[in-house]
Amino acid sequence: MLHIQCPHCGQSHQFPESTESRTVVCPDCQQSFVIPGLSNQRSNLGDEVLRRGRKMARDLHSISFRDEIMPLTQSNFVRFSRSFTFWGITLLGMIPLLIVTVDRTEAQLTLFALFFALVWGVIFKKFVLGDQGAWTWAIGSLFFTGIFGIWFLLFLYRYIVPDFYLQMADQSNPVVSLLGYVFQVGIWEEMCKALPVILVLKWIDPKLDRASILVIGLFSGLGFAAFENLNYGTNAVNSAYSLTRDYGVGGLVSGVQNAMVITLLRSVSLVFCHAVWTGIFTYFIGLSVINKDRRAAFFLTGLMVAALLHGMYDWLAGIQPTLAALLAGFSFVLFYAYVQKLTAEKEDLAAINEV
């Protein structure tokens, strides 16, 4: 039986199936209407499907493979090669996928640390400083501090710096701990990160411009953070193992989650923070170069500002992370103000030279 709705009154009724079209009368409103035969319906449906299929085939055949699907022409490749946006997005997406093809986990972790450092390096160099210079000093500074600088700092900690001084930051007294973070962690790490800038000014180019000094300092901070992160990652894994041994599956879950958070935090944000603090210090080093009569004053001022921000961040991170995050934001605001001041001075000098 067919369930057919009357087109006049809207009531639904049952009618016997038939291969032929026929006229029926609605039992409710007594109006007549035509019921198409099943064979005609199926035939019409088949014709419609066939017609649309042929049209789809013609439409597909009309699409140019070269123009619409693979428009990779020589002119396109030339535009790609000159586009920072293209290369930036491509490398940002592809490099992590290539890193995981490396066999050894230790090598993967090292490459990821360098990758995040270089991402921040591009952001600082191109968008914050607007520097168009060569990358030689920048990359050299990153690896110098990441490899030699950290080794030299650890050597001093182990053989030169007194133990009581190194342990100040770990004291239960909050005032002593804060002093330790500022005058031990902050000062020594900032001095370590400024080392390539000092060496370049002393032995290679004493008249290096302030923008180049900033670039070297920023990348030195990035290198320090990248290689320091490897040690923190190892510590996080060891902590997860200890929690698993002491608390079983619950400790394993907590330890792994904590390791993931530490890795993400240090790879993304603390690389940024280290670069900013070093940038502040090296900004004042640049001022000391052009103000020879106040060289020591500018140098010490930059060191103390950077060490204070660095130490207070580390101290607050263990007490109130929200305040630590706000301090990190303030650090960048301060650094960006220095950069804007430097940019304005360069523009004023260029305008004077034109006149």
Image (cartoon, rainbow, N blue to C red):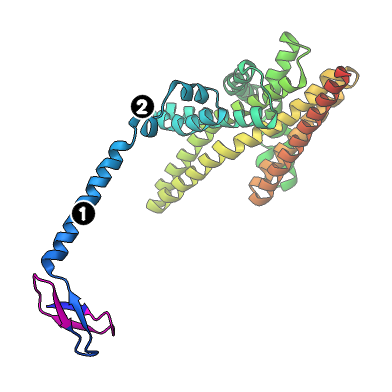
Q: Residue 13, relative to residue 349: is it above or below?
A: below
| Tag 1: amino acid | Val
What residue is at 41 percent from the left and 32 percent from the top? 97
Secondary structure found at label 1: helix
Q: Residue furthest right?
A: 293
Observer-nearest residue: 341 or 49? 49
Specify the label residue 49 is tagged with.
1
Give the magenta range: 5-24
Residue 165 is at least partly visible in this image: no
- List the residue tagged with mark 2: 103
Residue 304, percent from left and from top: 79, 32
In this view of the protein, which residue sits in the foreground, 34 or 61? 34
Q: Is residue 210 above or below residue 18?
A: above
- Mark sitting on residue 213: none
Query: Marks 1/2: CA distance?
Result: 53 Å
What amino acid type should be assigned to the residue bearing mark 2? Asp
Point out residue 206 in the picture as x, y percentages from the top left corner: 77, 12
Q: Nearer the viewer, residue 65 or 230?
A: 65
- Provide residue 225's location: percent of width, then percent of height: 59, 31
Is residue 345 found inside the magenta-colored segment of the image? Answer: no
* Image coordinates for residue 28, horizontal then vertical, percent: 23, 90
